[in-house]
Image (tube, grey):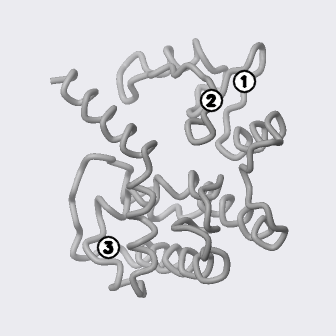
């Protein structure tokens, strides 16, 4: 929502605290994040939120303009959203942490190789008009941001997983966006406030 400058108010709920679930349930009936509240509607799934926003704001290109790119962007987004369980289970998203691992479980290595291949393929086929998967920033890039963060935290060198520099450059492009810079600064401020 920040990229297309859609107005919204953020409700920040600290997770992993005794009252976190109670706080979540006050704002979102599913108890899941992220949740988009719009009037009496609560949309609590990342892909559902993206589709809802695309439907509500057809003038904003949430998905790539061209049919072939859109056809790839949706399953790439879905795979980022619901796949790569080994990576999620072994490499939690720690936006500010740096903990490069010399070895990772084989299933995590398989996940990383698959992601590197996806990013390389999308950039080669559709990325000529800009630094993102499909050239210009789109919904698929938002879905990849948490994965880019996991790589920055845990993976010292993506070339060990088949990267030819494409995945590294793409992750750097994600972190160069103003939205990621703001997210990172917000995390730093939150950590400082927590003491």
Residue reaching furthest to the front: 129
Decide: is 123 above or below 59: below
Q: Which residue position holds label 2? A: 35
Instruction: Judge the density around disc 3: few (<14), some (14-19), many (≥20) Cα neighbours within 10 Å.
Output: some
| Quarter of the picture holding the C terminus | top left
Cβ atoms at labels 1 and 2 below 8 Å apart: yes
The mark lying in front, picked from 2 and 3, is 2
Q: Which residue position holds label 3? A: 104
Q: Nearer the viewer, residue 6 or 146?
A: 6
Instruction: Judge the density around disc 1: few (<14), some (14-19), many (≥20) Cα neighbours within 10 Å.
Output: some
Task: Estimate the x, y position of residue 121 in percent, counting from the top left.
Answer: 60, 81
At 25% across and 28% down in the image, what residue appears? 189
| Quarter of the picture holding the N terminus | top right
Sequence-earlier tag: 2 or 3: 2
Q: Nearer the viewer, residue 175 or 95?
A: 175
Residue 133 lies left or right of residue 22; in this view the side is right
Instruction: Judge the density around disc 2: few (<14), some (14-19), many (≥20) Cα neighbours within 10 Å.
Output: many
Q: Which residue position holds label 1? A: 42
The image quarter containing residue 152 is bottom left
Instruction: Find numbered disc 3 in the image and state the secondary structure of the residue it sits on.
Output: loop
Decide: is 78 above or below 19: below
Task: Estimate the x, y position of residue 8 in percent, counting from the top left.
Answer: 60, 22
Residue 103 lies left or right of residue 128; in this view the side is left
Residue 69 lies left or right of residue 14; in this view the side is right
Sequence-earlier tag: 1 or 2: 2
């Amino acid at each position: 929502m920040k990229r297309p400058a859609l107005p919204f108010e953020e409700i920040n709920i600290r997770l992993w605290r005794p009252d976190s679930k109670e706080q979540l349930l006050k704002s979102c009936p599913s108890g899941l994040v992220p949740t988009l509240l719009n009037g009496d509607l609560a949309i609590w799934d990342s892909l559902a939120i993206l589709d809802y926003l695309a439907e509500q704001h057809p003038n904003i290109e949430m998905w790539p303009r061209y049919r072939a790119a859109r056809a790839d962007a949706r399953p790439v987004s879905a795979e980022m959203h619901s796949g790569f369980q080994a990576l999620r289970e072994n490499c939690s998203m720690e936006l500010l942490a740096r903990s490069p691992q010399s070895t990772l479980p084989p299933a995590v290595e398989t996940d990383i190789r698959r992601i590197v291949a996806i990013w390389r393929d999308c950039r080669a086929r559709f990325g000529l008009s800009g630094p993102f998967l499909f050239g210009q920033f789109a919904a698929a890039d938002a879905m990849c941001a948490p994965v880019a963060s996991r790589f920055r935290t845990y993976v010292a060198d993506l070339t060990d997983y088949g990267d030819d520099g494409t995945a590294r450059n793409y992750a750097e492009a994600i972190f160069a966006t103003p939205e990621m810079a703001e997210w990172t600064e917000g995390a730093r401020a939150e950590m400082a406030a927590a003491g």
